[in-house]
Each structure stands twice: as structure tokens, then as C-alpha cells.
Amino acid sequence: MTAPKQRAPIPFPSKEPETTDLVRRCQSGDTDAFETLYRQHAARIYTLACHMAGSPEDGEDLLQEIFLQVYRKLGSFKGDAAIGTWLYRLALNHCLDYVRSRQAKMHKLTDTLDAEASFEPTARRETPIARLDLERAVERLPEGCREAFVLHDVEGFDHKEVGELLGIAEGTSKSQVFKARMKLRALLGRRA
Amino acid sequence: MHPNETAINAYVEESLDPVERREVEQHLASCASCRQLADDLREVLRAATTLGLREPPVRAWSRLERAIKLEREHAAPQDAPGAPHAAWTGRVRWAPWLAAAAALALATAIGLRFMPTTGPDPAASNQPGAGATIAAGEAAQSVETELRQAEAHYEKAIKGLEQIASSEQNALDPATAATLQKNLAVIDQAISESRAAVRSQPTSDPAQQSLIENFKMKMGLLQDTVALINEMRKGNEAGAARIASGLKQKGD
């Protein structure tokens, strides 16, 4: 059996004429155009924010802050990259800032594998992992390995990119993702 | 001898060189527990690729729109030449109370961002000696203080939103207004129960979390209500229907 291939980040609508026109309308102050831009990208950004923050409540706050930043900075968007790429980058940076400031605030270091014992034992299950169960389990991952897991296994970045984004070594990204998978295995009752 | 788990993980990721890969494969052929680990890691990887998009709550756009309008109202024209907020042309007149509510709600949400989600730092409470007791006590006190501040912020924000919702409630159709009242009553009951739990166990993390979650739920419901009233004022029937449907679903 072969492993699932890494998924490339979901492409955004790119420099199609209507997208360029939409951005131009946003930059000229058209509120309807900004709402359209929001509706095109909100789900993608909200999903990323929820995964990175670990809760839908914080994800919603992040979504709001991100689009406020989009609103503030859209005037400086020159169209060198696709608007979706620009927006995703801005969102990702905001999420990473949030994660870093929360970690600094809470002095919460990444757990080690020994902390797995703190998860309640679950009877082993052989059925495929349901999406909703995984969503909940990801929210319960400790900070550090959750972000690495989300960026690598969900968002499709490679370990080198994850390392650069999180400011950690490539090897640390590998070990964090491994920790996350092992914790998910335990949380989802797949450990004997 | 079993390969280490990291090697099995690398095997699943297909990042081993051919020699290492062959060694792991040979081992997996004869070891059920390592094979199980490889299958499980593969399943976690597979499931991760199935995580779909989440739709943000319907109120999210209304909250954002209010915050943007507020920001534009407060921005000096010369602040950022060419930036959107200097050029945006509002098509709807926004009542000052709405702007105030938006500011309050946004400030509350951001202010609570750093509210601890766990109890006192376990590292502090594990320190040996009298210092540890003091540290743990201070940490607990700090959490309680933050909780009280959070509670005050939420109550203030909720009060503002409640005033708006009740003064404008005539704008809602009777069925929606009744659903709203019913939902508010349920949340109020939950708030009073979690508040009682916090009072009896001030350092209990679940009790604190429950209280905050209930406050957030009430704010969310009131924000939805204000967003609904707004959409109705703007004559945006589709937007109003979308929010009203969300309100009803919460009551089901």
C-alpha cells in the first residue's frame, strides 16, 4: 500500500480578468466588491484559522482580524501575485503571529510523547477515521505539534517550508508532525 | 528487532532511502504490531486530506462590515492615501449605537484573546517548598482576576447588544423574536448555572471555560440579532433570511 500523496495547497482563483476587476473595485472602495472577495475566500481562511488556533471561536476572531488587515492593506496590493496567494500569505502570517503570542503568553511548551498518557484510553477502532472526529482531535493537539501537523498534513507544505514558517528546524518539523500523528492515533482510538 | 517508530513514520511518508525502505518492509511483513502502526499512521494521513472547508458563521461578515465602517468613520482622510478605507463610499447610514456596539464587541473579542484556556501553570504548582505554594496561589489569583475582568467585559458588551436588540425588536417578525427570546432564556440559564459553579469552585478550569463559552454564545446570538436587524434595515432580504435561518437552527 502506498502512502497518500501530499496535497498541494488548494489553489485560489488567480489572475482571471474578473478577479483583477474585483480587486480593482475593492481598491476603489466598493463595499459590495469587498463582500464578494470575503465570500470567495472566507471559508478557506476560516478553516485555516480554526485549525491553527484550535477552536472555532478563536478562528472566528482571527477571520475578522485577518479581513480587517486585508481591508487596510489591499491598497498596497500591486498584483504581483494572485490575490488568493497574497491573502493566504497574510492570513497565515496573522495566524502564526497569534500562535506565537499565545505561546509566549501561556508559557506553554510543546508536550512530549510522554504526555500521551494524559489522554483518556479509548477502545481500539478499526473503522476509517471520520472527518468530524479528526476535526475535534486536531483541536485537542498540543500547541506546537498542532501547527506543524496542520501546515504539513492538512495544508500540504513540506517540512522545509513548515520549518521556515514556524521558525523551527526542518528536523523539528518532522518530529512535531510525527508527535501529532501519534497523539491523533491515541485520541482516535487507533492504538492497541 | 523492531525499527523505531520514527523510521516507520518516515516509511509512511515515503522519505526513506531504498535500502532503509526495504528493511522496514521486510520487518512489517512479519511484525503485526509495527504493521498496525504503519496502517494507523497512513490512515491519519489519509484522513487529514479529507478535512474540508468550514463555513464561517453567518454573523462573521456583519461583524466585519461593522468593524470596517467604524474604522472608516474614525480614519482621517490623510491617514493612508490610496488605501481602501480612505476611499470607501458607504451606501448605508450607520447609527452611532451600532458603531459603538461593534467596537465593544470587537474589543471584547480581542481583549479576551489571551484569556488562559487552562488553569494555573502546572510547572508552577509542581515546584517544591513554600515558594511553590505561593506561586500556585498567585497563579490561581491571577486566573480569577482575569476571569472577573473577562466577565465584566462580556457583561458590558452583552448589555450594549441587549439594549440594541430590545429597542429594535419590533423590526423582527414575531416568530423570529420568539425564537430569539427562547434561545436567550436557555443561554441565560446556562450562564447562571456556570456562574454558580465558578463561585463554588473558583479555580475549576471546566467551570471557568463553561462560563466563558456561555458568554460567547450569548454574544454570538445577540450579534446575529443585530446583524439581522441591519440586513432588514438595508432591505437585504437574502442576507436577512440567511441569518434568520441560522437563528432558528440554533433554537431547534
Image: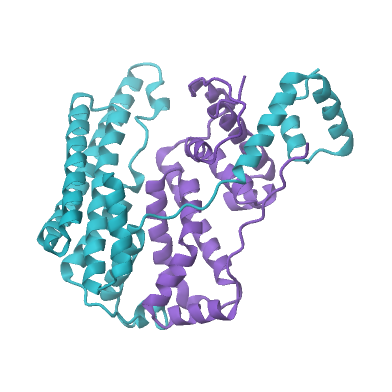
Residue A143 point in image, percent of width and height: 50, 39
Q: How is the image coloured?
A: by chain
Vertical side of B9 occupied by A125: above or below: above
- The answer to whether residue B250 is seen in the rendering is yes
Any idea which chain is the purple one in this picture?
A
Question: On the picture, is B146 further left or further right than A151?
Answer: left
- Toward the viewer: A74 or A22? A22
* Residue extending furthest toward the right: B19
Count of residue discs: 0
Please determine whether, in this image, residue B177 is positioned above or below residue B138: below
Residue B199 x/y as whole percent? 18, 28
Point 27% across, 27% down: residue: B203
Near-viewer residue (B183 or B77): B183
Task: Please say if A146 is above or below B60.
Answer: above
Rendered-image quadrant of the N terminus of chain A:
top right
Q: Picture quarter containing residue A31? A: bottom left
Indicate the colour of chain B: cyan
**Residue A38 image offset from top left, x and y in percent:** 44, 67
- Drawn side of residue A91 relative to residue B67, left or right: right
